[in-house]
Image (cartoon, helix red, strand yellow):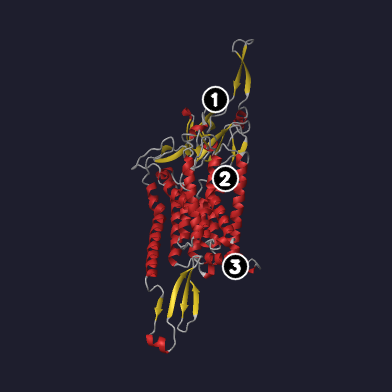
Amino acid sequence: MIDKSYIELTSLVNMTLSIMINILGLPNESTCFKLTVTACPAGLALYEVQSNSEMKDYECKCDNDHDDNIVKCVPDEGKLILKEGLWATNVNTKSLNGMMEYYQCPPGYCQCSSSKDKGTSTCNSVYYDSNQDLQCVCGREGYLCGNCNQTVTALLNKCVSCGHGNIALIFVLVAVDIIVITLILLSSVTIFSWLYPVLFYLQITPYIAQYFPVTFSAVQPYLHYISSAASLYFPYDFCIYPGMTSLVSYSLQYTPVLLFSTIFCCIWLLSSYRKFYNISISWSGVWLLILLLFTDVVNTSVSILNCPILRDSNGKKSMRWFVDGTVECFSGGHAGLATFAILVLIVCTLLIITLVVVVLGKVKKIKGCLRLRLWTAMFEKLLQEPFVDQYYWWAPTELIRRLLFIILITAFPGNLIPVMLLVMISVAVYMYIQPYQGLCTNILEVVLLGDILLMVMITSTDHFKTTAVFDSDHSFSIDQCGNVDQISEHAAVLIPFYFLPLMTSFVLIAKEIISRVKTVLSNRSPEACTVNKRTEESLTTNNHYPSSSCMINGPTGHSFELKFNSIGELTWQLQ
């Protein structure tokens, strides 16, 4: 309980007092001097100390008893040891004098300093009262350590230098994107059911893993590179010209989806002309590209709109961009980018609604526009194909769950508890309903979701946080730039779980390639279209035709089985 004298003393902070003292023995003599009352240093507070006098004595002590974010105070160095992943600021106002405020630091922005206390070792953030920028890794400064000195924030939140030499490489990568997107849109690709759980894992896990212990950062980028390449955003730190801002750099992540939209519209228009009647859009390719691009597009848009309210040292509140704290949200260049991000999220929402309408067969009821009804019918069949009849409408939920995960990861940075709860719900749902037709795909989905859940639960425990970074049997260092020379033994436990789905996908891809090769070889053999002759006598004497069957690949990626029966009737069946 804080007493009245404490309140009276703290209310005088930053005030200058004129004090007159009479000199003992000289009643007509006195001296006058001015005294300015200052607050305790950041992280320290006034505490009553024992005194023999009738007056109460106070002194500044570490306030970690009341402030859970402070691990330890080092007043001689003006330093505070904070919990891992925090960025702090000291608010000096008349009403909030010396109050510390904390915010989640973006991954890789703040320093990680070892702190050994009571037999445990952890990785903590460090705040210096003399210079707030000292809590940032080298090359960073400002709000949330978001500003890169003469460089720009790029992929994996690293500060990279800019130069004109990257322009040629970017044109090459854009050309590769154009070729890949065009081939997918014009080819009848097959979307295997196991791609759904594997793609979800590859796309979501890197965003979760960025909040794993700092020593895991030596391993974390590799899956992020693969995920970025799968989303057609190549794992390269795009920086085109000197002085390039983080807003421009971040907007380049929209490149794949803009290329996809442009190429799709061009093919659509060309197919409407008679000269190009043989050109048609592969709807299996469209759905595959949606699955590949959706997660990164949503993450980019939501991240652009991630604007926490920060208070500066003077107590002024402002909305700052989480990616670059020096950018004030919804003003200047950020206003235009935020508007575009909102439009993209609206389009993504409309896309989900459209898929729901299509997969439920509501488009069939629309009169007229035969071409649109035909295309939506093919797309409807494609969306329903991997799932059991009871859950034929399941395809849109693949996009919905990606949207929910990205929102939770962005809205609660550094807090994996909401993500863990959503994963637990997902595991229960997929175990109960088993939406896929193949048993192996249902098992693979549950295993991969369980893998994510296991990693999140392990890294969320206090024991792992205090031992994963610095353990007794394995020592390493973290330099000022946040680079880790090697991974700890405890963090190494996550590696098999982290890369297990990737290895599984390689095995499944190899299996499909072998299966396809066998199919091609068998189709080239004389038995590809088999003729089952009963006997030469029955053919000539009974006027029967030879029964035969053939497999034909349609333009939408589906196979048709054509059958001739013994009396010459032709039947077909969609496979």
Considering depth in this image, is 57 or 293 the residue closer to the camera? 293
Q: Which residue is mark 2?
A: 304
| Mark 1: secondary structure | loop
Three-letter amino acid code at the position of disc 2: Ile
Residue 137 appears at what percent x and percent y?
47, 36
Residue 366 quadrant: bottom right
Residue 236 appears at what percent x and percent y?
46, 44
Query: What crowding class fits label 1: few (fewer than 14 Cα within 10 Å), some (14-19), or many (20 or more)?
Result: few
Considering depth in this image, is 370 or 293 the residue closer to the camera? 370
Three-letter amino acid code at the position of disc 3: Gly
Residue 269 visible in the snapshot: yes
Residue 268 appears at what percent x and percent y?
58, 58
Task: Please report whichever mark, 1 or 3, sits nearer to the chain's N-terminal start.
Answer: 1
Task: Please report whichever mark, 3 or 2, sits nearer to the chain's N-terminal start.
Answer: 2
Residue 114 quadrant: top left
Residue that sits furthest to the left in the current view: 473
Distance of label 1 from label 3 (alpha carbons): 87 Å
Residue 324, above or below 350: above
Q: Which residue is mark 3?
A: 361
Residue that sits furthest to the right in the current view: 367
Query: What crowding class fits label 2: few (fewer than 14 Cα within 10 Å), some (14-19), or many (20 or more)?
Result: many
Q: Name the front one of labels 1 and 2.
A: 2
Q: Which residue is mark 1?
A: 53
Quadrant (top left, top right, bottom left, bottom right) of the N terminus: top right
Residue 562 appears at what percent x and percent y?
47, 75
Residue that sits furthest to the front in the current view: 275
| Mark 2: secondary structure | helix
